[in-house]
Amino acid sequence: MKNITPKDCVVRVSSTLDSSSGKKNLLDGSDETCWSSAQGLPQTVRLSWNELIPATHFAITFQGGFSATAVSVYVAAVRPAKYVDNITLGMVLGGKVYPKDSNGRQVFELPIPEAFPDSVHDEEHPLSPTLSGTAALPVHPADPNDDRQWIKELKLEFEKSADPWGRIVVYHIELLQA
């Protein structure tokens, strides 16, 4: 799998233990630096970027003893549509993953929900999405036969921790394409 984490990725976190273990360390590629949360759950990490990317998986490396053991994964996706270029979905819960309490790199498939129809809102299907304007993001995919999921944001909500005080320590987060 190829790391496709955008260079312009902006990281937001719910808390930081101190300035030496800040959010900038999540994407620096160094095994010597990490992000450490303050105590208490839940903790969150939110990644956002300018260009849409066809990520299929994400990888995360925890410090053993401070791993999250239950994580809700939220994505903001863009879906191909039948009658318009694309439908931009807001941040939605894709699913949950259950990492091991381990120091090793763990790879998970991005759980992108399938519950949204691929057409514009109409009276026959009142639960279909409505378009509220066009997004400023580039239109992808250019090929209507490209059925990959294009995402623009990822949020990880750490609900449970191996640490009894609810601290989370993460060395790396990567967005991957299969």
Image (cartoon, grey):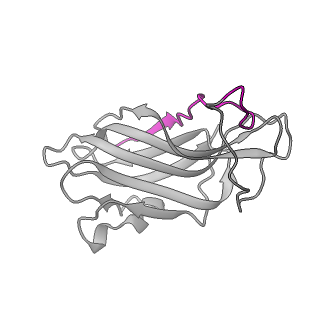
Overall secondary structure of the magenta section: loop
* The image quarter in which residue 2 lies: top right
The residue sitting at the left extreme is: 164
Q: Which residues are magenta?
A: 103-125
* The image quarter in which residue 124 lies: top right
Residue 172, compared with residue 81, is above or below; it is: below
Residue nearest the observer in this picture, 155 or 178: 155
x, y percentage for residue 19? 29, 74
Assign the C terminus to one quadrant of the image: top right
* The image quarter in which residue 71 lies: top left
Q: At x 32% / y 45%, what residue is drawn?
A: 158
Q: What is the number of callouts on the image?
A: 0
x, y percentage for residue 6? 61, 59
x, y percentage for residue 21? 30, 66
The verdict on residue 157 being magenta is no
Q: Is residue 69 visible?
A: yes
Q: At x 29% / y 72%, what residue is drawn?
A: 20
Assign the N terminus to one quadrant of the image: top right
Q: At x 54% / y 37%, what residue is drawn?
A: 110
Residue nearest the observer in this picture, 88 or 12: 88
The residue sitting at the bottom extreme is: 19
Residue nearest the observer in this picture, 134 or 52: 134
Q: Is residue 28 visible?
A: no
Q: At x 47% / y 43%, what residue is drawn?
A: 74
x, y percentage for residue 67? 28, 43
The verdict on residue 116 being magenta is yes
Residue 69, compared with residue 11, is above or below; it is: above
Q: Is residue 169 left or right of residue 146?
A: left
The residue sitting at the top extreme is: 124
Q: Is residue 109 left or right of residue 127?
A: left
Q: Is residue 75 left or right of residue 37?
A: right
Residue nearest the observer in this picture, 107 or 48: 48
